[in-house]
Image (cartoon, rainbow, N blue to C red):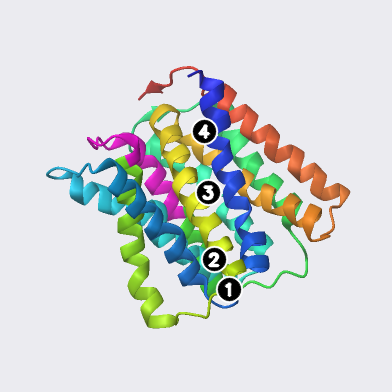
């Protein structure tokens, strides 16, 4: 499989994640964010484990549990807290620091010397997100801001350690066990804070989409990308998620798309392109 193919397949993941907003608002019952996270994650993990029937060994149990919580469980919990307390644009802007966190981890822990162009592109991606989504009417809530930043830090660490920790598991089992541990992390939060709603056919279709496409397929492609690409490239591709959500809202919900927003969109795409080009060759270690 060529490098370009891997990048394009990995990019499908944040695009599918970007559809979460419209699926949630149009197909799911209101005010059940942790149920949505639970039904998205845990069944997908159980399907993959039942299919592969491969188990971690020794210290890999602890590693895979930590990765599952960082990449999915804690991240999802913080994502929903931020979504309920912040405007969607502000939450996405704060989440756009994730590529920079990954690059700092690569530089500080893995001692990877990153090209200057990659740092400039990472900052440009954040600026592009601000241009595309910022509104002067946004109101900041400190709990929501803290949750958004904590979620970005969590997934950045998960992306980094997924690449640099050695876990002896094939891709599908590696993905499945992370989703299971993430689901077990979310389960007590759901049981404490929410109750099971009455389900309609529309709700079932929405949850099924989130599980099969937004988790099972999406995370397989995501972790495949992490195993074969630089974590900085994968993390920068994550900027496509709010971009996809923004355009789906424009196409299906009649949300406005301004000229300024289009400029931000172009800047984000340019940032992604520059990062993958600048890191296309093997990078040096300090």
Q: Assess disc 1: are there few (<14), some (14-19) or many (≥20) residues with their C-alpha within 10 Å of its C-alpha.
A: few
Percent coordinates x, y for residue 74 in the rendering: 39, 61
Which of the labelled discs sits on residue 200, or is there none? 1
Q: CA distance from mark 2 to mark 4?
A: 34 Å
Badge 1 marks a residue whose secondary structure is loop
Taking the spot 50% from the left edge, 67% from the top edge, the residue there is: 36
Label pair 2/1, CB-CB below 8 angstroms: yes
Q: Which residues are magenta?
A: 153-172
Taking the spot 24% from the left edge, 47% from the top edge, the residue there is: 63
As drawn, is 253 to the left or to the right of 164? Answer: right
Foreground label between 4 and 3: 3
Residue where numbered disc 4 is placed: 233
Residue where numbered disc 3 is placed: 213
Give the vertical position of 248 relative to 60 (above or below).
below
Residue where numbered disc 2 is placed: 204
Q: Is residue 159 magenta?
A: yes
């Amino acid at each position: 499989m060529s490098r370009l193919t891997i990048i394009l397949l990995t990019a499908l993941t944040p695009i599918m994640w970007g559809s979460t907003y419209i699926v949630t608002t149009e197909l799911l019952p209101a005010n059940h964010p942790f149920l949505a996270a639970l039904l998205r994650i845990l069944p997908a993990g159980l399907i993959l484990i039942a299919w592969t029937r491969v188990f971690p060994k020794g210290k890999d149990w602890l590693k895979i549990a930590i990765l599952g919580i960082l990449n999915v469980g804690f991240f999802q919990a913080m994502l929903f807290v931020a979504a309920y307390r912040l405007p969607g644009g502000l939450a996405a802007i704060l989440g756009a620091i994730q590529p920079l966190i990954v690059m700092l981890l690569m530089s500080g822990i893995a001692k990877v010397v990153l090209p200057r162009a990659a740092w400039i592109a990472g900052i440009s991606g954040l600026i592009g997100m601000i241009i595309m989504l910022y509104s002067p009417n946004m109101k900041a809530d400190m709990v929501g801001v803290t949750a958004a930043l904590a979620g970005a830090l969590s997934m950045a660490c998960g992306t980094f350690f997924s690449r640099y920790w050695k876990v002896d598991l094939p891709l599908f089992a590696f993905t499945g066990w992370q989703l299971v541990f993430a689901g077990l992390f979310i389960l007590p939060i759901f049981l404490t804070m929410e109750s099971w709603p009455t389900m309609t056919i529309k709700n079932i279709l929405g949850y099924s989409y989130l599980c099969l496409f937004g988790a099972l397929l999406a995370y397989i492609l995501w972790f495949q990308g992490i195993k074969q690409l630089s974590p900085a490239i994968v993390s920068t591709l994550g900027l496509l998620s709010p971009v996809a959500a923004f355009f789906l809202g424009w196409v299906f919900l009649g949300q406005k798309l301004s000229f300024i927003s289009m400029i931000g969109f172009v800047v984000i795409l340019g940032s992604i392109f520059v990062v993958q080009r600048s890191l296309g060759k093997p990078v040096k270690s300090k």
